[in-house]
Every structure is written in structure tokens, then in C-alpha cells.
Amino acid sequence: MWSVFKFLFLLCFPLLVTGYTSTFIGLLCNSANRPVFTPYAEGFVAGITIWWLFWQRLMFFSTLMHELNHLLAAAICLRRPVALTVHERGEGEAQMSGNLLNPFISLAPYCIPLAAIAGIPLYLLLKALYLRFALGMLGFLLATHWVDVSKTFRSYQPDLQESGMLFSLAFCLVMNVIMSAIVTTLAMNTPSDVVTFLHDGYLLCKQLGYAAGCFAIHLAETGRTAASSLLQRF
């Protein structure tokens, strides 16, 4: 089953990454002149800078988020969490019931910004009185995820080897764009706009797929016509 899913996802990857990335860029451009954009962007830049510079010292927290992601993804897939171990130096392990390989569980830490998602309730609680701080906090938490991914996404990682590097790269890229856009949409707009983003991204993917299909049919027709012309000459 997972082999079929991986094949179909890789087949649709160019459409998904182009459609949702374009929609995300459009969202950012539309929000660039709004007052909420600046503190959110400042928090994101601060998060990138601080987390990158002190990542070695903060590795315990990065590993904790990594392993929690595995366990939460396993729980969503109805696999019972068994144990969670995180060492001070940054080594960790999450154990769960079952032994079937599941790309969603394996790749969850690389594509789900758990800290930012966990911070959304606090953001909603604080934004009425401390909007600037709440926006900066959410941007900061999202940035820590991107730094963690850039530091840990390596070919020797067992999680990535289990799912295959090509699929892992494609899946994590698309999911990171979508999840980052969802967090950003919640920060700058309303929850209903998340549905709008997902719908607009889907429509753009659909339009790109239709255009690609028409182009492929045109190429096939052109090739057939050219082949027929050559055969008639000989």
C-alpha cells in the first residue's frame, strides 16, 4: 500500500509543490503590508538566528520535539506509544507498538512544526492583549522547526532511509510548505482562511495538472504527426 502511495505522491509532487508554494507566496505578499506581518517576521528571523547559533546547546529540546512527533504520529495511526527516551546530549528514541514501516510516523519530525502548533492555543490566548508578542512567539517557534530540519535532514538518518530519500525529500518539502502556511495563516488571518488556503492550493494544483495534461497530449499529437510524415517519405 505504501509503495503505491509513494509512487502516486512522487508523480504528483511537481504539481503539489508548485501549487501550494505559489499559494503560500501569494499569502505572504498579501500580508506584507499588514501590521501583523512585521512582528511575525521579526520573531521568525530571531528564531532562525538564535536556534541556529545555539543549536548544539539546545539539542535536548530539539530531540524532545523530534521524538514527541514520532509518538503523536504513531497515536494518530492507532499505534500505542511505549516509551520515550531523551538524553542530555541530544540522543533520543521513541518506541511504539507494531513493527510496520509507516512513512507518516517516520517523517513526522521533519514536516510537522510541533512546537508552533502547540503554541497556537497560547497565541490565541495572548493576542487580544499582547498581539505583537504573540505573533513574534509564533514566528519564533516556527523558525525553530526549520532550523531543526536543516540540521537533521541527512541521508544517514534511519527515518529517512526507511522511507527512501527521494520520497522523504519530496514529502517533507510539500508538507513543510503546507504546515508553515497554515501556521502563518492562523497568525495573520482567521481559522477559516486556512480552509481557503488549502482550497486555493488544490485548485491551482488542479489547473497545473490540466495544463500539463494538455501539453502532454499536444506533444503526443505532434510526435505522431511527425512520425507519420517520416513514414510517408520512406
Image (cartoon, rainbow, N blue to C red):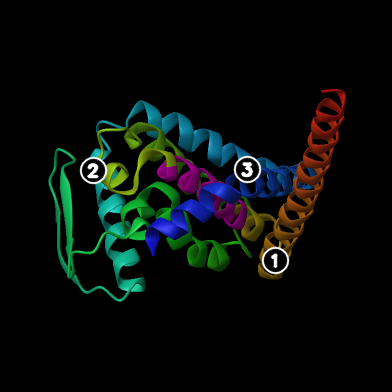
Which sits in the foreground, 7 or 106? 7
Which sits in the foreground, 228 or 198? 228
Which residue matches tag 3?
14
Above or below, comparing residue 151 to residue 132 in the picture: above
Q: Earlier in the sequence, mark 1 or mark 2?
A: 2
Q: Which residues are magenta?
A: 167-183
Above or below, comparing residue 6 to residue 169 in the picture: below
Q: Secondary structure at mark 1?
A: loop
- Kindly indicate the quadrant of the structure image that contains residue 75: bottom left
Outermost residue, front direction?
Answer: 234
Q: Secondary structure at mark 2?
A: helix
How many other residues sit within 10 Å of disc 3, few (<14), some (14-19) or many (≥20)? some
Circles 1 and 2: CB atoms closer than 8 Å: no
Q: Earlier in the sequence, mark 1 or mark 3?
A: 3
Give x and y (percent) for residue 180: 56, 50
Q: Amino acid at mark 2?
A: Pro
Task: Quote the CA–CA distance across marks 1 and 2.
Answer: 38 Å
